[in-house]
Image: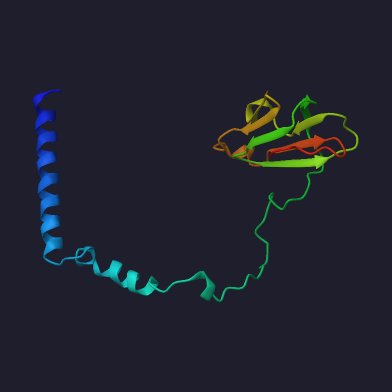
Amino acid sequence: MNKFVKRCLITGLIMMVAGGAMAVTAVSYGASIWDLTPNGAIRWRNTLEDFSFDNMDYKYESGPTDDFSYLDFEEPAEKGSQIYTTGMADSLSAEIRTGRLIIKEDPDVSEITIYSNKQKNSWHIEEDNGTLKLKTDSGLSLDDDDLVMTVSVPKGFQFSDV
């Protein structure tokens, strides 16, 4: 370490010891932490002292949903192209940062089949120890907001962990 860093560390240590000594002295004279806080914090403390969620008079009322666009949870008209097939996965791990993931039971498939409406650079799929891992890109590109990945599973199949 050079001399400057040593001097800074020694000075900082001295300041911490001095501050601690002043705080201990102030507490011994009867000071409290609330004497040091700004007035707004004291008002919040006094206001929230008897706060309880049990006393809330909140009732959930659904409002209009006119502002939904592609996120209205409707199944897309077409699944897209088949991008992956496996019969070995028993759990699913998905990190979806853009677009949607739909898991549906399909009597026409005999294995877990994944479809996507976008090309390869929008998603990444790997299988590790029986876990199927799906990842999408970071979502920074605006054209990938309409990415839809559909996981079709055979009739009666259930993932042990999703």
Give residue 121's position: percent from left, percent from top.
Answer: 63, 26
Residue at 65% from the left image edge and 59% from the top image edge = 67
Residue at 73% from the left image edge and 37% from the top image edge = 160
Give residue 111's position: percent from left, percent from top.
Answer: 83, 29
Residue at 57% from the left image edge and 36% from the top image edge = 141
Q: Nearer the viewer, residue 5 or 135?
A: 5
Where, by quadrant of the figure, is residue 116 drawn?
top right
Left or right relative to 28: residue 64: right
> Most extreme residue toward the front, as rendered?
28
Residue at 62% from the left image edge and 38% from the top image edge = 96
Q: How is the image coloured?
A: rainbow
Left or right relative to 94: residue 35: left
- Give the total of numbered labels: 0
Where, by quadrant of the figure, is residue 13 drawn?
top left
Give residue 73's position: percent from left, percent from top.
Answer: 73, 51
Left or right relative to 34: residue 85: right
Residue 92, above or below 58: above
Left or right relative to 2: residue 95: right
Q: Nearer the viewer, residue 139 or 16?
A: 16
Residue 155, above or below 87: below
Residue 154, above or below 50: above
> Most extreme residue toward the right, as rendered?
108
Position of the C terminus, as image quadrant, is top right
Give residue 68's position: percent from left, percent from top.
Answer: 67, 56
Position of the N terminus, as image quadrant, is top left
